[in-house]
Amino acid sequence: MKYNLFISSLLVMFFSVLIGQDSPFGQVEVLDSKMNSFFVSNTDIEVLATGFEWSEGPVWVPKLNGLLFSDVPQNKVYFWSPEKGLSLFLDPSGYTSGVSRVGEKGSNGLTLDENGNLILCQHGDRRIAKLSSWSFQQPQYETLVDQFEGKRFNSPNDLVFSKNGTLFFTDPPYGLSQQDQDPDKELPYNGVYKFTTDGSLKLITNKLERPNGIGLSLDEKTLYVANSYAINPIILAVDLTSFPYQSRVFFDGSELLKNRDGLFDGLKVHSSGMIFATGPGGVLIIDPEGKHLGTILLQNATANCGFDLEEDYLYMTSDAVLARIKLK
């Protein structure tokens, strides 16, 4: 068995050298030939910007022809475009009170609704909010939802819309300075929620220790939820056609975590149905059956990822770095 594991490790190293061998920030590890559908040989990982405290939540905004992403501890959202490079976009982004506080107070996950409005998970304000105006000198936000059964959320983290406008989101305690032990925590769990266009809010599950990244399968029958917890490093698959909701472990990262740094965090679903999930080592590519096809191995712990409109690039928020890799 040890010999077989050694040979397997050599094969992984061999394939890792074949793709992205000249990129100083990382390389692509190929475990399955399906990976060749996404990456070309010697693909470089481009570092686009650096100097952030913890970059998160990338979303491509077509009308701006560029990417928005959060710096959570700094309470800011930045904008990057091929034409203009990097600029500050929103300040504050997630905590709008003038009262000083510690912790992860900024926005985290970002997305667009069907009308192109920017929707933010705001850690500090403990809500899902909409940017009221695309005038950014003094950003104004509108609360979409901020409590469940009369109790304030912990700190909404990541989110995804279905085609009919239903919003799914996660609510771990990262925005609370003492997390689960924080005296301001009102809910006794860390939940995953469904918020419909008629204002109805339902709890999908409260069984994950640290629900984080979230995405929908192409047919929208399955909800993928990443659990950022070292003791239980899984991606959960929730059957949205069942009620009560039934769930199963879609992918277990326990073995990977023995040899690689990084917990599951953000995830996105490609138009092919493949799941691009940040986790141990970088960004894992997993097929809809739960098979690990390979990993974009990065130097830093990687928080989240996202595609541009045409899926020509995958953008990655990796600690202090914004990076991207060309896709086929």
Image: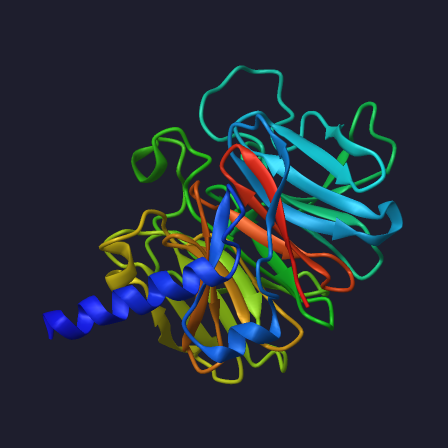
| Residue that appears at 68% across and 60% down | 199
Q: Left or right: 165 with respect to 30?
A: right
- Left-right relation of 275 to 206: right
Task: Please tell me in which quadrant of the rendered image residue 136 appears.
Answer: top right
Q: Position of residue 257 (x, y in %)?
A: 27, 55
Q: Is residue 192 visible?
A: no
| In the image: residue 218, left or right of residue 175 | right
Q: Nearer the viewer, residue 295 or 101?
A: 295
Q: What is the count of numbered marks? A: 0
- Position of 70 relative to 272 (above/below): above
x and y, in percent, of residue 250 in the image? 39, 74
113 or 7, nearer to the observer: 7
Classify 7 as above or below 117.
below
Residue sitting at x 87%, y 32%? 135
Figure check: 211 above or below 164: above
Tell me residue 313's x, y (percent).
69, 57
